[in-house]
Amino acid sequence: MVSTLGSTLGIGLRAALVTLVLTGVLYPLAVTGLSQVLFHEEANGSLVTNEKGQVVGSALIGQGFSRAGYFQPRPSAAGNGYDAAASSGSNLGPTSQKLRDRAAAEAERLLEENPDASGPVPAELVTTSGSGLDPHLSPEAARWQAPRVARARHVAPERILAVVDAHIEGRTLGVLGEPRVNVLQLNLALDRQFGEGMSTTAEAP
């Protein structure tokens, strides 16, 4: 009886040890190694650098830009805003008065800052994403801001729109999602083409 129990326990411990080594050591090492070889940039956070080689953010994480010469992203409810350590949405539903008041205040601010914009304020510019860290805008939301950016940089709006159009990303695999523009990369492109209007990290993440 004791011998049988000891044998069973030994088998269980060996199975647990083998499983631990396979799933806790070898598999993570293999996946990490393959990702570094096949997807090096993505595996290291899709970091974005400026012309000086300084890391100014990630292509996967939105950050705030508030000055006139830069495109602004969607509002953020992550922490105190654009906090990558506190990713979250506002959890406010369509019947929430707080949500309506906040959206109305945001729309009023945007209209005041963008007097030359054509058409109503795009909905995405007054609503937060589910993560609060969406790094993208639709091409339409970026184009809506183009007159303000052009005026602040003292260039023709057509030149700003050309930069927007050059940075439109298509649907993933041609079918998933919608066309979009990465706000950080778009603003860095503005600095490269028209000169740095301010710190490329904006509110310094």
Image: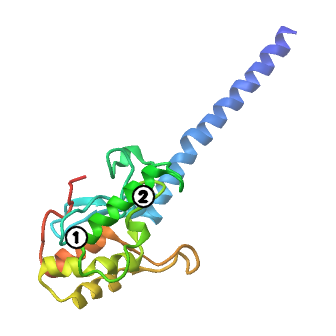
Give the residue at x 24% y 59%.
55
Q: Where is residue 116 in the image (x, y as percent from the top left)?
A: 24, 81
Whether residue 71 is visible = no
Dot 1: within a 10 Å radius of its alpha carbon, few (fewer than 14), some, or many (20 or more) residues?
some
Q: Position of residue 177 (x, y in %)?
A: 54, 73
- Label 2, secondary structure: give it: loop
Give the residue at x 53% y 52%.
93
Q: Which amino acid does label 1 sit on?
A: Glu
Find residue 128 and name its label: 2
Whether residue 168 is visible = yes
- The N terminus, quarter of image: top right
Q: Earlier in the sequence, mark 1 or mark 2?
A: 1
Q: Where is residue 94 in the image (x, y as percent from the top left)?
A: 53, 56
Find residue 113 and name its label: 1
| Colour mapping used in the image | rainbow
Using the rendered view, name the quadrant where residue 121 is placed. bottom left
Determine the CA span between mark 1 and mark 2: 19 Å
Using the rendered view, name the quadrant where residue 147 is placed. bottom left
Q: Please determine whether, in this image, residue 173 is positioned above or below residue 83.
A: below
Q: In this view, does 202 lie to the left or right of 72?
A: left
